[in-house]
Image (spheres, rainbow, N blue to C red):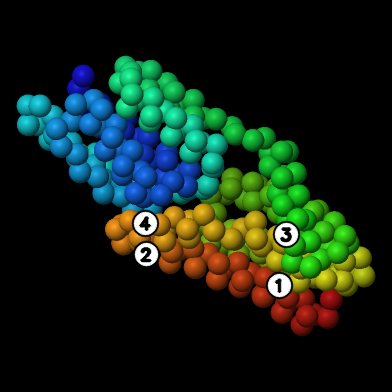
């Protein structure tokens, strides 16, 4: 089996892991294991949140290198689980690469949960967080509605390939504006709890934890980059909420 194709397939699996929210150390380990399962004598893998570089050496001493650029990513636990099962299957059985490519393509094209289901789940989670932070049934109902609207808004805005940070800013601005506006009608006076309940859906907690884990496991550069990006995203979320409240207060809504 040609080691070049093994490397291409392994890096594609690693890229899918990274796009789906997998940690850098997990991505590097997966690529290493897959290449060695197919007979690679030596493997070197370097990954950060936006790039993967991998090299392998085969029996003849030939060295192959593959680079993959990662432009965007989002957490998808379903795909992470499927990719984990696929990598274990590869390491245990060394199947034909065509079979691996077909299974990988199926995972990549998987729709996961429908938009309706994701919207409902987001609404329920937002309402639950609102109650957790001290909101009553009125606030939880408002959070439920806003949580669903925010999910639909983000899905719509993805069509325009908008920057992640700007999208988070707009989402937080929408949440705070809607919560503040509803509170002024007297329907849900505790707009702070409604805002927090919805913002919790957008906080990049998984990425932050992955960054800390990468630093602990020795991938310091990648960990620092991930943590810094998570903090910046959190700042944009806070900025969007703050801007909405200040703006609406100034125009006396």
9 or 223, which is in the foreground? 223
- Residue under the image location 82 percent in, 59 percent down: 140
Q: Earlier in the sequence, mark 4 or mark 2?
A: 4
**3D distance between C-alphas at marks 1 and 3:** 21 Å
**3D distance between C-alphas at marks 4 and 2:** 8 Å
Q: Is residue 26 visible?
A: yes
User: Is 35 on the left or on the right of 109, as rendered?
Assistant: left
Q: Quadrant of the N terminus?
A: top left
- Residue under the image location 65 percent in, 60 percent down: 200
Estimate the x, y position of residue 68 in percent, counting from the top left.
32, 42
**Residue 244 badge:** 1
77 or 50, which is in the foreground? 77
- Residue under the image location 19 percent in, 26 percent down: 39
Q: Earlier in the sequence, mark 3 or mark 2?
A: 3
**Residue 213 badge:** none
Is disc 3 placed on a helix, strand or loop?
helix
Q: Earlier in the sequence, mark 1 or mark 2?
A: 2
Mark 3 = which residue?
Answer: 129
**3D distance between C-alphas at marks 3 and 2:** 29 Å
Estimate the x, y position of residue 169 in percent, counting from the top left.
60, 65
29 or 150, which is in the foreground? 29
Q: Earlier in the sequence, mark 3 or mark 4?
A: 3
**3D distance between C-alphas at marks 1 and 2:** 30 Å
Which image quadrant is residue 116 in? top right
Is disc 1 placed on a helix, strand or loop?
helix
**Residue 224 badge:** 2
Mark 4 = which residue?
Answer: 214
168 or 37, which is in the foreground? 37
**3D distance between C-alphas at marks 1 and 4:** 35 Å
Is disc 4 placed on a helix, strand or loop?
helix
173, above or below 117, in the image? below
User: Is 24 on the left or on the right of 176, as rendered?
Assistant: left
């Amino acid at each position: 089996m040609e080691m070049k194709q093994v490397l291409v397939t392994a890096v594609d699996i690693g890229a899918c892991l990274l796009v789906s929210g997998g940690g850098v150390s997990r991505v590097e380990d997966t690529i290493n294991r897959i290449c060695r399962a197919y007979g690679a004598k030596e493997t070197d893998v370097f990954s950060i949140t936006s790039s993967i570089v991998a090299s392998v050496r085969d029996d003849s001493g030939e060295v192959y290198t593959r680079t993959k650029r990662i432009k965007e990513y989002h957490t998808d636990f379903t795909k992470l689980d499927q990719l984990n099962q696929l990598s274990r299957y590869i390491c245990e059985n060394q199947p034909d690469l065509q079979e691996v490519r077909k299974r990988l393509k199926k995972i990549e094209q998987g729709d996961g949960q429908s938009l309706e289901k994701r919207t409902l789940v987001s609404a329920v989670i937002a309402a639950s967080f609102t109650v957790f932070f001290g909101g009553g049934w009125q606030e939880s109902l408002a959070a439920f509605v806003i949580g669903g609207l925010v999910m639909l808004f983000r899905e719509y805005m993805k069509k325009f390939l908008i920057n992640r940070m700007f999208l988070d800013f707009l989402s937080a601005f929408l949440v705070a504006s809607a919560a503040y506006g509803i509170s002024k009608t007297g329907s849900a006076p505790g707009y702070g709890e409604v805002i927090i309940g919805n913002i919790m859906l957008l906080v990049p907690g998984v990425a932050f934890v992955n960054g800390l884990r990468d630093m602990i496991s020795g991938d310091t550069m990648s960990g620092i980059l991930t943590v810094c990006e998570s903090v910046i995203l959190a700042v944009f979320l806070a900025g969007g909420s703050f801007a909405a409240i200040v703006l609406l207060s100034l125009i006396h809504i």
